[in-house]
Image (tube, rainbow, N blue to C red):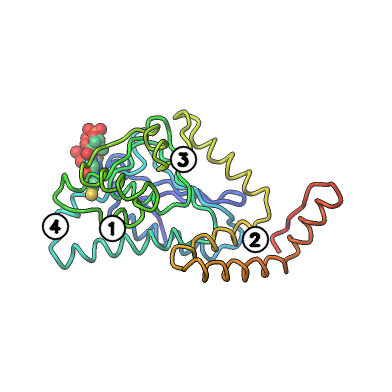
Amino acid sequence: MEYSTLIYEKREHYGLITLNRPDKLNALNFQLFTELNDVITNIELDESIYALIITGSGEKAFAAGADIGELNKSDIRSGKQFSEYGSKVMLKLEQLNIPVIAAINGFALGGGLELALSCHIRFASEKAKMGQPEVNLGIIPGYGATQRLPKIVGKAKAIELIISAKTIDAETAKSIGLVNEVFPHTELLDKTIEFVNLVLSKGPLAVSAAVKTINASENLTLQDGLSYESQIFGEVCGTQDFKEGTGAFLEKRNANFIGK
Ligand code: COA
């Protein structure tokens, strides 16, 4: 599929998606969701990709939300479909078994913040501004903020942000646990890649198993989650990377992981 609303770069062992509608502050329209869905499917099938970064093109925005021009045409039935489609794509992103990192380079509002919430880690530029302004438009968030935001920042903060529609800066977002780190604007992507390279130096099967097991915790009781963790722990103990990692420690040398 040819992409017109995003750019996908497959770098050595990680992928970089750049949302690319800068004249519309990378607002998420139907075409962008279709392309995002396609690229996520390709990444799912690509065993040589061990991490994914998502950022926005242009100086101003990660993504300024769902495309309000498209949204404006919704009625009860199509509004539900509008929400379901975006949610489905974001859930698929969240359920990738590789670390997914949002590099929030500017406005992340509404659906833009929800896209970042469906990433596993959020790094922000010091210029980033975040919020859920949907109530300004007479709607509620439709791509998961009512469900994910309380888990990330707590129920009271999530309700405060959603019902006030207020926009917060990157440092405030960090102080409430909404973003992991804040970097100078010009260094955001480099710092994100630096983090990815750190992760890539670890055993890729172990990294992937960790993400998969943590993702599963969302839907499991503690008891079921612990037994799932034991099952996956056993599986990674059967890998060559496990023999290599533990062997390297005992031999006092660096491990050379091969992803098998
Ligand atoms: N949907 C569609 N278009 C959008 C958009 C969105 N969510 N957000 C911004 N745009 C468009 C603007 O309409 C404008 O297009 P135009 O040049 O053709 O008129 C362009 O992007 C630039 O935006 P503009 O508003 O001129 O930039 P700004 O710097 O003055 O303001 C924002 C930036 C983010 C504060 C402002 O664009 C905004 O409030 N956007 C909507 C945020 C929102 O409510 N998101 C939730 C949607 S559910």
Q: Which quadrant does ligand 1 occupy?
A: top left
Query: What residue is rendered at 21% in x and 46% in y?
Result: 163
Q: Amino acid at mark 4?
A: Lys
Q: Residue 30 bears which disc, if any? A: 1
Q: Give neighbour class at mark 3: few <14, some 14-19, many 20+ (Cα, 10 Å).
A: many
Q: Which residue is mark 3?
A: 123
**x%, y% of residue 8?**
47, 51
Vertical relation: 97 (above or below) 160:
below
Which of the two labelled residues, at mark 3 and mark 4, occupies the earlier sequence position?
A: 4
Inter-mark Cα distance, 1 to 4: 13 Å
**Mark 4 C-beta closer than 8 Å to ligand 1:** no
**x%, y% of residue 259?**
69, 60
Q: Nearer the viewer, mark 4 or mark 2?
A: 2
Inter-mark Cα distance, 3 to 1: 26 Å
Q: Which residue is mark 2?
A: 205
Horizontal relation, residue 101 to residue 118: left or right: right
Horizontal relation, residue 81 to residue 35: left or right: left
